[in-house]
Amino acid sequence: MKRIIIAIDGFSSCGKSTLAKGLAKSLHYAYLDSGAMYRAVTLYFIDNQVDYNDPAAVEDALHHIQIHFERIDGQNRTFLNDRDVEHDIREMRVSDHVSPVSAISAVRRAMVSQQQAMGARRGIVADGRDIGTVVFPDAELKIFLVADVDVRTSRRHLELAAKGIDAEWDDIKKNIEERDRIDSSRADSPLRKADDAVVIDNTLLSEEQQLEKALALAREKIER
Ligand code: DC
């Protein structure tokens, strides 16, 4: 069976990871959460007081950052230098700094090369902001997800609450809008739809309906 790369891009909290995990599970593919990598770098900078406006400090810190993923009890976990940071990287203190950190070219170069290595054998679903445009421009299937901002805020609110992370609805919405703005206007690899990406608006779709649509697109590419 042909193994393809599926690239999913879109704004913050559009349900990219839900769709990516669903596709990976259905197709028995690996899942690459590229946002978790930028979050782990941001957490490292916060914990180690790295001034991310200082290029030399950033370069130096990047030499001390190793990120990998493990599946534990059916769940994807992100490891920063062998420490499980899956919970910590979702906190608002990380969300508040991750967009400026991920706009730094040295950070992007380091992450993109690790991501490309993870996808070398194909059979992978990756989600992020530049997956279809920069990381895997040759992905067989590219999906660009969109959804209404209030719906995205409510989903993020529920998701954080389920993880025991307390955050105000208004603060979450502000953070989402601010990240949309920075992610799509930065100079290096701004978020944009790849010319050959299929747009899925999931504002009114259930998780199952969204997965069904994407799976049909994937099977078309795999069986071609
Ligand atoms: O998908 P997420 O919300 O966990 O991503 C966190 C941040 O990381 C997001 O605001 C922008 C950045 N990011 C990026 O620049 N490129 C990617 N491929 C994935 C995420």
Image: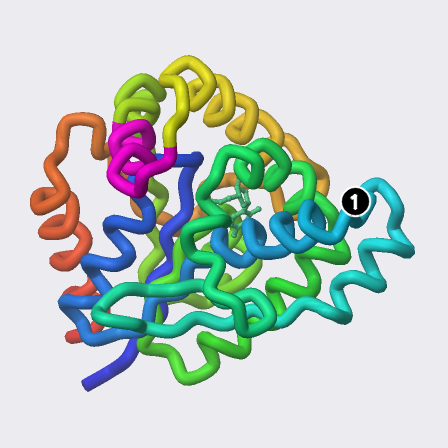
| Residue 190 location (% of width, % of height) | 60, 41
For the C terminus, give its image quadrant: bottom left
| 163 magenta-colored | yes
Q: Is residue 93 visible?
A: yes
Q: Which coloring applies here?
A: rainbow
* Left or right of residue 6, residue 101 in this image: right
Q: Is residue 49 left or right of residue 36?
A: right
* Quadrant where the image shows the N terminus: bottom left
User: Which stretch is magenta?
Assistant: 155-165
Picture quadrant where residue 61 is located: bottom right
Label 1 beta carbon less than 8 Å to ligand 1: no
Which residue does the image show at 83% across and 61% down from the upper left?
59
Residue where numbered disc 1 is placed? 52
Measured from the top left, where is residue 153 in percent x and y?
34, 24
Q: Residue at x 49, y 18 (%)?
A: 174
User: Which secondary structure class fits the magenta region best?
Assistant: helix
**Label 1 secondary element:** loop
Residue at 56% x, 65% y is 80
